[in-house]
Image: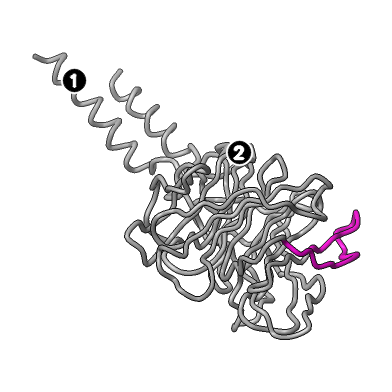
Amino acid sequence: MYKLWLFSILLILFTRPDAKAQQLEVAFSIQDDLLTWFSVDDPSIQNTISVTGLPPWLEGNALAYDTDNERLLFVHGNTLTNRAIYAVDLSGVTLSASGTVSAGAAVNLGTMSFEGPREVYGGSFYNGSYYVLIDGTDSLRKVSFDAAGTITSQININLPGSRDMFLGDIAFAANGDLWIAGFNQYDGSPADDRLWRFSTADGGNTFDYQQTIEPAGDRYNGIFFDVTGTDLYGYRYNTVINGYGGIDTTTGAPTLIYSGYPFIQGGDLSNGFFIGVEVPEPTSALMVMTGLGCLFGRRRRAQA
């Protein structure tokens, strides 16, 4: 009887899969030419995404998830007059917390040009368009697409006031509010931190200033809203409060959730969405040992 039971345990455990698809809310990060997906609630569940066709000198930034075409958008962040807009198609990609996640080749969608050299660090996707923050000009670049995902137009949008949002990331809330994180002018001290909030009533062509929040600590390097568009997340590094967590939209204060890769250097984050992710199960060998322990424990109790 016991031999039959033991054989059944071994058969089940060695034939079961080591990974199981779970419905997770995920977001994305970019550091240089490296893309990473992570669980919004538990970023220890993560993996890098293999992409070909990117230049080795790329300092990727302005990351956004194009919900219409299921792809990631980003550019080279450091100073350039003309820069490529890259897209990585995720429509056929299986996200897994183990092994290799391959997204194939990045696609060059076209060029983003300015009158002179500019830095571009903040990016987000809203209402069918890709927005980036043009460093030091208080303006946005709006990139629009047709149904096939091809660029149809690019326009600059001036943000009211004079705030010089250097090195800021941007994120759109569900109600259309635009949030910008960065520091003011050239001083990187905590006194210069800012979270700015703007609103739009015409779908993203003009914006009105609403609020400035001065959180304690260094600026947020990356911010994004969750799938509901109401909860704000972000990360900081080289500060007293290092790591990733939720952000109070009233005070700007962080609630730390996780410290570690990929939130240990400059980069950018995308908005979140739900997807099935393959997460490793306990290994078969470990489960066999657990099963054997239960078996022999039962036999000892039966013999006592």
* Residue 76, placed above or below residue 276: below
The structure residue drawn at horizontal position 41% and vertical position 35%, both measured from the top left corner, is: 13
Instruction: Label the magenta part by its dominant secondary structure.
Output: strand
Q: Which residue is mark 2?
A: 230
How far apart in space, not on screen, are marks 2 and 1 (Cα)?
A: 55 Å
Q: Which residue is mark 1?
A: 299
176 vs 237, left or right, is: right
The span picked out in magenta is 142-159
Check disc 1 and give the amino acid type: Arg
Residue 211 placement (x, y as % from top left): 60, 49
* Residue 44, placed above or below residue 86: above
The structure residue drawn at horizontal position 74% and vertical position 49%, both measured from the top left corner, is: 67
Residue 251 placement (x, y as % from top left): 46, 45
The structure residue drawn at horizontal position 67% and vertical position 54%, both measured from the top left corner, is: 93
Say which quadrant the C terminus sits in. Answer: top left
The structure residue drawn at horizontal position 80% and vertical position 67%, both measured from the top left corner, is: 156
Q: Quadrant of residue 108?
A: bottom right
Residue 132 placement (x, y as % from top left): 70, 65
**Direction left: furthest residue:** 304
Check disc 2 and give the amino acid type: Thr
Tell me the mark number nearer the camera, choosing from 2 and 1.
2
Task: Identify the secondary structure beneath mark 1.
Answer: helix
Q: Nearer the viewer, residue 163 or 219?
A: 163
Mark 1 burial class by Cα count in 10 Å: few <14, some 14-19, many 20+: few
Residue 259 placement (x, y as % from top left): 37, 55
Q: Nearer the viewer, residue 123 or 18?
A: 123
Magenta segment includes 158 = yes
